[in-house]
Image: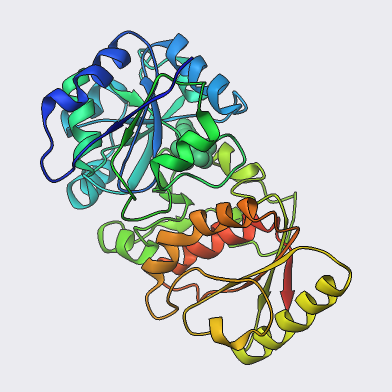
Amino acid sequence: METRVIPVDREHLQKETVAEAAELLRAGELVAFPTETVYGLGGDALMPDAARKIYAAKGRPSDNPLIVHIADTGALPKLASEIPDAAWLLAERFWPGPMTMILKKKPIVPDATTGGLATVAIRMPSDPVAAMLIRESGVFIAAPSANASGRPSPTRAEHVYEDLNGRIPMILDGGSVPIGLESTIVDLTGETPMVLRPGYITIEQLREVLPDVQYDPAILKRVRDDTIVAKAPGMRYRHYAPKGELTIFEGDLAAVTARIQAEAEAKLAEGARVAVLASEETKDCYRGLTVRCVGDRDCEETVAAHLFETLREFDRMGAEYIFGECFPEDGVGQAVMNRLMKAAGYRIVRV
Ligand code: AMP
Ligand code: MG
């Protein structure tokens, strides 16, 4: 299959630009498209065959459910059988935007989309291309991140092409996405609202609306501990990982950079290909090493925006060992560290 890449100008978005993509979706085909979080791989959420094509194209385990994307809150009662007040409060405050909620599903949502679960994940994206595609197609779009399963999520159309060329008919290329990390997932099906995946919307922001929101314990773990099982199936898999072995170092920044320098030199001496994941503030501390700056510690949004593409760059340079710094876990830092720890398979060294 030939994969066509269609440029879209977000500033001057025309219905005609997404018309063909909308037609493909209505016909049960797949289209990759930009959202404000990462690129999504979309198919008709109510068509089991379209959902199956998504799993096949990504090589995604079929028990890892998809998020259903909607364009207005009127869609909620069509997809969810129970809508607690908390859901309306979250929708009013955070939609359209990078927040996904888990609700009990209606029978219309097929098991193929929810991985056999009785619940459904729903999000209303703010990206104009995504919103127009949902509206123009008239379809609820099931869309996981548009990467091959296990690889870092795509933040540019080139990343989608790298992973899915030949496997899907179309990619809408809207350039780099603004946020760069996947949505915050909030489960509203239990007694207490639970964050199943941290994202750009922080728990502090959620608590302004729902004061009793808690983290799923799996998010807070800092070691590989298989007795703590994540409630979001997708958070159980090895994910976001570069091909090389990534180790992250935490502690006093000066000690961390010194330790990374020493570890990297030792691997270099063995003849290995080594790279360092550093920040704006530390990138000049390293000598004689291949260093990639992921962003600015003072502005964690920049780290979020560049994390996945930096991990992909390490693959392109063939890095066998990657040594990375830790980042503060406040605000969006929680999501950054969650992805980084998973990418490292919880290989964390305390300095
Ligand atoms: P992705 O869109 O690739 O970021 O993947 C969607 C994420 O949402 C995965 O981590 C899924 O496990 C999670 N998810 C989707 N539906 C549900 C659900 N019904 N219950 C819990 N987690 C879900
Ligand atoms: Mg994903």
Q: Quadrant of the C terminus?
A: bottom right
Image x and y of residue 72, in percent: 17, 32
Out of 108 and 16, give the one closest to the viewer: 16
| Res 291 → quadrant | bottom right
Image x and y of residue 76, in percent: 24, 29
Answer with left or right where residue 261 lies relative to residue 112: right
Residue positioned 10% across, 41% down in the render: 12
Q: Is residue 346 above or below residue 330?
A: above
Residue that protrudes farthest toward the right in the picture: 270
| Res 348 → quadrant | bottom right
Image x and y of residue 237, in percent: 65, 41
Q: Is residue 145 at all visible to an observer of this figure?
A: no
Residue positioned 39% across, 81% down in the render: 298
Total labels: the figure holds 0
Q: Is residue 226 at all visible to an observer of this figure?
A: yes
Answer with left or right where residue 282 lies relative to residue 120: right
Out of 115 and 342, give the one closest to the viewer: 342
Residue positioned 42% across, 46% down in the render: 185
Give the colour scheme of this rendering: rainbow
Image x and y of residue 184, in percent: 40, 51
Residue positioned 49% across, 63% down in the render: 336
